[in-house]
Amino acid sequence: MGRNPMRAAVTLCAAAALAIPLGAVSAAPSADDAAGTRQNQSQQTRDPVLVDCSWQPAVRPETFLLACGDGNSRLVSLHWIRWDGNTAVGRGTNAVNDCVPYCAAGTFHSYPVSVRLDQPRAWEKDPGEQHYTRMTLTYTDGRPDGSPRVVTYPLWA
């Protein structure tokens, strides 16, 4: 043990005392590992998304553009009652341009709607992600001229 046996013994005991807790900690999953496991589990059970015109996924969006080309129909003030692996249900307002006398000079009118999203499928951009592929709007108080009370749209992506 060299010239100072007491110092060597203390050093060995200190090293052993430090090694025991380190070994126990390294054998247990770290907080980062546990968080990663939770994140992987939540990714595997993620709810479907609603994909917008710019191919951006959203869960429970407050707005959604229906007329991607000209912006003359959009959903605003959306409040979601249900959003799960099969269906999303909410309420909001459909703001629709009457395009009178033409769209650039038209006026937007607001119509209360209930919104239903369903038929989730794998998303082409990210096959691990599910997205809703159908939207049904039900006008609850008035509706745009010529529009039926219930309208169903296939969703892109």
Image (cartoon, rainbow, N blue to C red):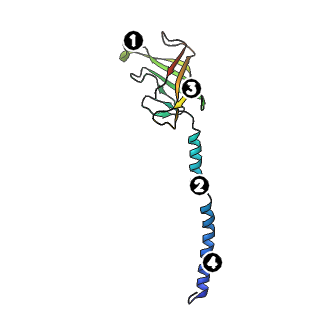
* Residue for point 49% across, 23% down: 75
Q: Which of the two discs, 1 and 3, labels the residue nearer the N terminus?
A: 1
* Residue 55 in picture, x, y percent from top left: 44, 32
Amino acid type, label 2: Ala
Density class for disc 1 (Cα within 10 Å; few <14, some 14-19, many ≥20) is few
Amino acid type, label 3: Asp
Of badges 1 and 2, the one in the foreground is: 2
Q: Are marks 1 and 3 in contact (CB under 8 Å)?
A: no
Q: Which of the two discs, 1 and 4, labels the residue nearer the N terminus?
A: 4
3D distance between C-alphas at marks 3 and 4: 65 Å
Q: Identify the residue position indicated by label 4 in the image.
A: 13
* Residue for point 53% across, 23% down: 135
* Residue for point 55% across, 33% down: 48
Regarding mark 3 in the picture, which secondary structure is present there?
A: strand
Please say if 74 is above or below 18: above
Q: Identify the residue position indicated by label 3 in the image.
A: 118
Q: Identify the residue position indicated by label 2 in the image.
A: 31
How many labels were placed on the picture? 4
Q: Are marks 1 and 2 in contact (CB under 8 Å)?
A: no
Density class for disc 2 (Cα within 10 Å; few <14, some 14-19, many ≥20) is few
Task: State the mark number for residue 100.
Answer: 1
Q: Are marks 3 and 4 in contact (CB under 8 Å)?
A: no
Amino acid type, label 1: Val
* Residue 7 in picture, x, y percent from top left: 59, 84
Regarding mark 2 in the picture, which secondary structure is present there?
A: helix
Identity of the residue furthest to the bottom in this view: 3
Quadrant including the N terminus = bottom right
Q: Nearer the viewer, residue 1 or 74?
A: 1
